[in-house]
């Protein structure tokens, strides 16, 4: 397992998590009122467009990471996205962090460690 490959996967995790926060912001900007220009403009919000670009870059980076790491190592690391997104959602959107969130994050982290080490 290469440290560089792990770093690339962790960069993908961060990018996907940021993309999710931007998707949430874009969802709050949507005003779906039939197929009007206002609806189309809402679909093309800056938050959505930036999130899509980040996802595209993360996908290319992910494919590159798979050149250096086996999928059986890279994919469990990708589960760390499920730890990072709730934390970012709390700080960016004020979503609550409750005990079960921390318990779930702990279970995920332990699972990743078991899978990768």
Image (spheres, rainbow, N blue to C red):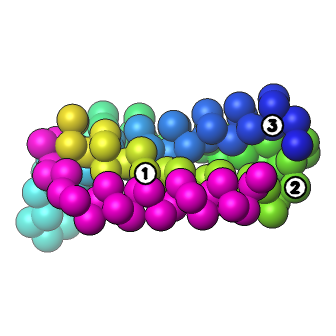
Residue 24 place in picture, x, y as percent: 26, 50
Residues at discs 3 and 2 in contact (Cβ within 8 Å): no
Label 2 belongs to which residue? Answer: 70
Q: In the rendered image, is residue 40 in sight?
A: no
Rounded to the nearest whole Å, what is the CA distance between mark 3 and mark 1?
A: 20 Å
Label 1 belongs to which residue? Answer: 83
Residue at (19%, 51%) from the top-left corner? 97
Q: Secondary structure at mark 2?
A: loop
- Residues shaded magenta: 93-117
Please tell me whether residue 57 is drawn above or below residue 116 in the rendered image. above
Instruction: Name the chief secondary structure element in magenta.
Output: helix
**Magenta run includes residue 104:** yes
Please tell me whether residue 68 is drawn above or below residue 24 in the rendered image. above
Label 3 belongs to which residue? Answer: 5
Rounded to the nearest whole Å, what is the CA distance between mark 3 and mark 2?
A: 9 Å
Which label sits in the foreground, 3 or 1?
1
**Magenta run includes residue 115:** yes
Rounded to the nearest whole Å, what is the CA distance between mark 2 and mark 1?
A: 22 Å
Residue 106 place in picture, x, y as percent: 44, 57
Q: Quadrant of the image for the N terminus?
A: top right
Q: Secondary structure at mark 3?
A: helix
Sequence-earlier tag: 3 or 1: 3
Q: Secondary structure at mark 1?
A: helix
Sequence-earlier tag: 2 or 1: 2
Sequence-earlier tag: 3 or 2: 3
């Amino acid at each position: 397992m290469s440290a560089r490959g792990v770093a690339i996967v962790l960069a993908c995790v961060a990018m996907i998590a940021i993309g999710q926060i931007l998707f949430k912001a874009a969802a709050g900007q949507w005003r779906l009122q039939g197929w009007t220009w206002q609806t189309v403009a809402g679909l093309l919000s800056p938050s959505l467009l930036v999130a899509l670009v980040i996802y595209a870059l993360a996908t290319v980076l992910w494919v590159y990471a798979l050149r250096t790491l086996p999928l059986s190592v890279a994919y469990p690391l990708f589960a760390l996205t499920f730890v990072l997104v709730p934390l970012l959602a709390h700080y960016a959107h004020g979503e609550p962090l409750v005990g079960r969130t921390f318990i779930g994050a702990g279970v995920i982290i332990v699972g990743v460690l078991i899978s990768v080490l």
